[in-house]
Amino acid sequence: MAQRLDGKVPLAEVVLVDRYLRNPFQIRLAAEFLGYLARRKAFVPNTSLRVRTLELYSSYGPKPALWSHDWASPWTRDDVLEAVLESIHEKAFRQVEKKNQIPHSRSIELRWEDGVCWTLVMDEGVSFVAMANPVSSFDFEAPPDAQAKRILEGRFEVLRKAKTPATFWLSPLGTCS
């Protein structure tokens, strides 16, 4: 994979599918996955970066206050996610879908301009980790750009939640559906 990422053929498209991008912590973990590709210079100006996630519904319960809390407003979450993605790559966009339109399994798919493709399917996505200090506050009332900046700049320790290893499947190069 490293040879492919460092090769001469640029990535045409990256698609991350995760129905659980509901809170700042989950969005930060997804940003780390995608940011790794950006730091490796895997994105070229024409690379499309698409993130598919589940639509949120407005919440009228207690006001969210921590990194692990879900946004009360789906529109704010969508704007924050869009701002985070645009900071990673200028041709990034979010695709919010209904529950019956998005697979349960989480995955990341890489397609190169020569048609070669690779998929990583993650049974738990990034849910197998948790914040070491889950009481870290987050300002859900800040403007979306400020929330995105906080998500990208926040510093915290991440721990594995379960003792069992996370389950994932890799497709061989060239076998995306």
Image: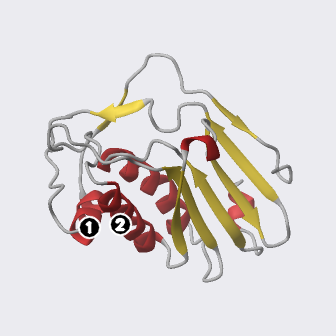
Where residue 1 appears, as percent x and y from the top left, is 72, 53
Whether tag 2 and tag 1 are in contact, CB under 8 A, the answer is yes
Q: What element carries label 1?
A: helix
Where residue 13 appears, as percent x and y from the top left, is 68, 67
- Residue type, label 2: Asp
Q: Give the labeled residue for mark 1.
A: 144
Measured in 3D between alpha carbons, the distance from the residue under mark 2 to the one under mark 1, in whole angstroms, is 6 Å
How is the structure coloured here? secondary structure
Residue 39 lies, with reference to residue 31, above or below; the image says below
The earlier-in-sequence mark between 2 and 1 is 2
Residue at point 85%, 66% (across, down): 115
Q: Is mark 2 on a helix, strand or loop?
A: helix
| Disc 2 crowd, CA 10 A, few/some/many (<14, 14-19, 20+) | some
- Residue type, label 1: Pro
Where residue 57 appears, as percent x and y from the top left, is 37, 46
- Snapshot quadrant of residue 128: top left
Residue at point 18%, 55% (across, down): 140
| Disc 1 crowd, CA 10 A, few/some/many (<14, 14-19, 20+) | many
Q: Give the labeled residue for mark 2.
A: 79
Residue 86: image tag: none
User: What is the total number of numbered labels drawn onto the structure image?
Assistant: 2
Q: Which of 19 and 30 is in front in this view?
A: 19
Residue 138 lies, with reference to residue 167, above or below; the image says below
Residue 118 lies, with reference to residue 85, above or below; the image says above
- Snapshot quadrant of residue 46: bottom right
Tell me: 64 left or right of 55: left
